[in-house]
Each structure stands twice: as structure tokens, then as C-alpha cells.
Image (spheres, coloured by chain):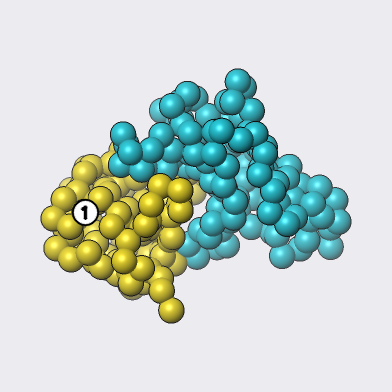
Chain colours: A yellow, B cyan
Amino acid sequence: DGGITQSPKYLFRKEGQNVTLSCEQNLNHDAMYWYRQDPGQGLRLIYYSQIVNDFQKGDIAEGYSVSREKKESFPLTVTSAQKNPTAFYLCASTGGYFIGYTFGSGTRLTVV
Amino acid sequence: DQQVKQNSPSLSVQEGRISILNCDYTNSMFDYFLWYKKYPAEGPTFLISISSIKDKNEDGRFTVFLNKSAKHLSLHIVPSQPGDSAVYFCAASAGGNTGNQFYFGTGTSLTVIP
């Protein structure tokens, strides 16, 4: 069954630590995206990648890093430079403009 | 700056009645629009789309209307069912110039009362 898998579902981070959120898709999609959702706000784009070994910053990239070494994988690292990392993180992919996004089930990150 | 706005954070409707969710956008380059439905602690799921060459698209109980001159779209759900209770996001894109990125509204939480 094709889809996007995000792991873990819940993640706790101590202040000053880097953490990596996993996103894997078996849809053969070229483009992948990371969004962040905060209460009362829409989904805000962190990073996106349209092809392997290439990625672009979104609207709120500061404090985050990504890599795209394989088509199937687009991990997101939340670094200690991210001042307010507690949020719900969503990974998405698309096989084409008129297909829209397929989303993963999300990772809730909490700083403790 | 929010390019896609959903000004109603919540909406309550009786079962069987019509639900109307509204969305406004500011970027005249947007030419493709989507509606997503989201349950708590889950990823959004695609509901319905509309291209700027159309002003209406219908799929079962769901109809999306687009008014380009007003930069406004709406989602109609008829009849509303309790299982429709969720957060609904509208999203818009200007296509390849922005990496096929979709801009999302803040969401409207729909509650359908049995």
C-alpha cells in the first residue's frame, strides 16, 4: 500500500539538542515538503525538495535542516537554533501539480 | 503575510443541513486550489480541487465554488453528516514558479451536530 510514513509519532527533545524527524514515501513522488502546524495557524512551509540532492528553503527555514539523498526519504533536523520547536510537523509529497499533496500522519515534537 | 485566509475558525451545523466553509486569497497568480480535511493528530487528506479555469467542481456531497474576481472560494457540504466533523484547510498554488508549493489557510473547525 503506497503512502508516506513519518516517525516517530511523538518526540520529546531537551533544550539544546538536535533531533531528526523521519519521512519516507513509496509513492515514487519526486517532490517532498515539510510543513509545521501551530495552534491557530495554517501549515507553514519549512523546506521542500523537487528532486534528489536538491532542496529549497520555505517560509520558516531558520533553525531547520534537511537532506534528500534518496528519492524516498526527506528527513528534517530540528536544530538547537530553532527557538520555538514545539509543534506538529507534517511531511508531504506530490507526483504532480494537479495531484496535490499526500501527507504523512505527522510528528508531534515537544521540547521539555 | 498570510496569502490564504480562512476567517472563520469554527462552524457548527445541524446534521442534514448545508455547511459552507469560506476561503479568501490575495495572490492573483494562484491558479489551483485544494480543500483538505484533517482529524486531530493525523495528516490532512485531500478532499476536492478546482482549477482557475472553472468556477465550480462537484464530487458527491462536496462542491467547491471559485470566484476569481473576488479571490474567494467556498466549500459546500450537503447534507452534512457527523463524520464530516473535522478541520478543513483550503490551499492555493501558483504552480511551478514556486516549486508547486501550496499555501494553506489557518483552517476552519467544522462540528456537525447529530
Inspect the image, locate mark 1, and give the three-letter code of the amino acid beneath it. Answer: Ile
Q: Classify the position of the C terminus of chain A by image quarter.
A: bottom left
Residue drawn at (37%, 43%), measured in percent from left and top?
A: B101
- Is residue B114 visible in the rendered image? The answer is yes
Residue drawn at (70%, 60%), measured in percent from left and top?
A: B84
Q: Chain of mark 1?
A: A
In the image, is residue B20 above or below residue B114?
above
Q: Is residue B101 left or right of residue B45?
A: left
Image location of residue B113, percent across then percent down: 81, 58
How many C-alpha atoms fall within 10 Å of the one at disc 1: few (<14), some, or many (≥20)? some
Residue drawn at (17%, 57%), measured in percent from left and top?
A: A52
The residue indicated by pointer 1 is A51
Pick the residue in front: B109 or B79: B79
Is label 1 in a helix, a strand or a loop?
strand
Image location of residue B13, percent across then percent down: 80, 50
Pick the residue in front: B49 or B71: B49
Q: Is residue B65 left or right of residue A97?
A: right
Residue drawn at (50%, 65%), measured in percent from left and top?
A: B42
Q: Classify the position of the N terminus of chain A by image quarter.
A: bottom left
Image location of residue B66, percent across then percent down: 63, 33
